[in-house]
Image (cartoon, rainbow, N blue to C red):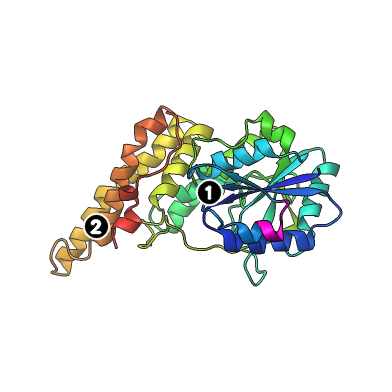
Amino acid sequence: MDVSIVFVNYQTEALLLNCLRSVYAHTNNLQFECIVVDNHFIPNANEQILTEFPETRWIDAGYNSGFSIANNIGLKAAVGKYILFLNTDTLIFDTSIHQAMQHLVYDKSLVALGGNQLDSNKQALPYYRTLNDIRRDFYILPNKPFFHRLINLLLPSQQFSRSEETNNLVGAFLMASKENLLALNGWDEDFFMYAEDAELSFRLSKIGKLAYFKDVNFIHLIKENEFRRTEYSWVNRFSVQIQVSNLLWVRKSYGILAFSLIYLNYTLLAPIFWIWKICLNILTQKPLDHDTKNQRIFTQKLAVLYRYFFPILLLRKGPYRIKQHENIDQVIK
């Protein structure tokens, strides 16, 4: 078996069916298997899939285990030399899976590669080129050129010897050898959702090169999810689950200081954000609490983040999944 393709399913059978059709239509000249790890098994919901693709291996995780645990279940069950982790909300439209495997076979300096994300019109979707590009976005500073230059100076984009090289692979399409993945103990199961691909990329980059190639592309049908942001602003640009996961990644990969600096940034920002708004209301002769929803959302999100401060600081065992009432973007509408 050349490639084992691992899917994590959570009530996405319709998307998965279309994805499988695209995989089988465009993946030739290699032996592959498809493994689905179901995080919310519903009897007979997969009937059409298994009727059309009876060779699909369907594994019921038994509960909503999250992305990392489910991927590891698929990894352990896989028999392919190479493993492709592929989202169910994706489509393959050319020979990208075969091309990805060929790059790994012939370039021994590579340990993993990702696919270029395209929208349904096959236009490139933006992504973080390096891990430092992600880290810069965590800091909430005044949207002024001085602060942009400062954060770029402290966390510059990493440079590589080849144009294809990176240190950050998107988990929607990520291929590596089973041998290397098992050597790293697979995905970090402390992560429930989000940032697990950045953490895995960090560890993979320590044993070899990561890359995106122009001939490896896929369509990503990005959609809304239960952790979406409903109140977006410069300050409130993160959902709580995304930020808890990212803070866990920063703590694991970059240590206590980098982790604590983000908390310090948010802690100092909260009173400044309130004082600015109150002063503005005074100057415009409005009630002190006029139009302070943005401030309240940020304060409540910060309070939730502090509930996870010591567990993450001490690296207590996860998975780190926020509770329903902590999903402030859904609680406040």
Q: Please provide percent x and percent y for residue 33.
A: 74, 48
Give the residue type at disc 1: Ile
Residue under pointer 1: 134
Q: What secondary structure is marked by label 1? A: helix
Q: CA distance from mark 1 to mark 2?
A: 28 Å
Q: For the N terminus, which image quadrant?
A: top right
Is residue 87 located in the magenta-colored stretch of the structure? Answer: no
Left or right, 328 with respect to 32, comes to: left
Task: Give the quadrant of residue 256.
Answer: top left
Q: Which residue is outermost to the bottom?
A: 121
Q: Please provide percent x and percent y for residue 42.
A: 51, 53
As drawn, the label of residue 206 is none
Quick one: label 2, few (<14), some, or many (20+) residues within 10 Å?
few
Give the foreground label among 1 and 2. 1
Q: Camera-side residue: 26 or 103?
A: 26
Give the residue type at disc 2: Trp
Q: Residue at x 40, y 53 (%)?
A: 239
Check the image and report above or below for 116 versus 203: below
Q: Is residue 308 visible?
A: yes
Q: What secondary structure is marked by label 2? A: helix
Q: Please provide percent x and percent y for residue 84.
A: 70, 47
State which region is magenta. Answer: 50-55
Quick one: label 1, few (<14), some, or many (20+) residues within 10 Å?
some
Q: For the C terminus, which image quadrant?
A: bottom left
As drawn, the label of residue 276 is 2
